[in-house]
Amino acid sequence: MPRRMLRTRSRKRVSVRTPGGRVVTHYKEEKPGYPRCAICGDKLRGIPREKPRKLSRTEVRVSRLYGGNVCHRCLRYGLEMGVAREWGLETPPIYGRTS
């Protein structure tokens, strides 16, 4: 009987022949989904599709403000909104996207 965490139909099964001649079932590890932006939900570029424990700290995040959490478009829009609020502008500049 497999371990409790392996008892699910979502894991792929692979038949493997052992050196002793038996055929056993191995369960393939699930690959996680792509990391997503916390605001718009787009895929984050530059971050590999792996579990965080297999990656170093510099591979998990992009070296920029909110890197690894927010995409570049949402970050730019948020910074422009903050500057417009600080300067007292009624309508901040909008470049194609208003999410």
Image (spheres, rainbow, N blue to C red):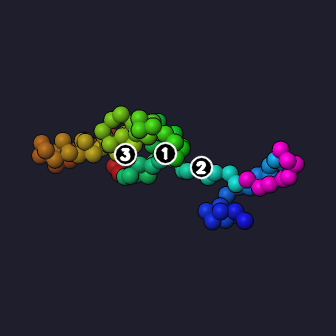
Q: Nearer the viewer, residue 81 or 7?
A: 7
Which secondary structure, mark 1? helix
Q: Nearer the viewer, residue 75 or 99?
A: 75
The residue labelled by disc 1 is: 53
| Type of amino acid at the residue the image marks with label 2 | Lys
Q: Nearer the viewer, residue 93 or 49?
A: 49
Place of residue 9 in the rendered image (x, y in percent of width and height, measured from the top left) = 69, 64
Q: In the figure, is residue 51 to the left or right of 97?
A: right
The residue labelled by disc 2 is: 31
Magenta stretch, residue numbers: 19-26
Identify the residue shown where x is 52% and y is 42%.
54
Place of residue 86 in the rendered image (x, y in percent of width and height, measured from the top left) = 13, 44
Place of residue 49 in the rendered image (x, y in percent of width and height, measured from the top left) = 54, 43
Camera-nearest label, 2 or 3: 2
Identify the residue shown where x is 36% and y is 40%.
67
The residue labelled by disc 3 is: 70
**First-in-chain label (3 vs 1):** 1
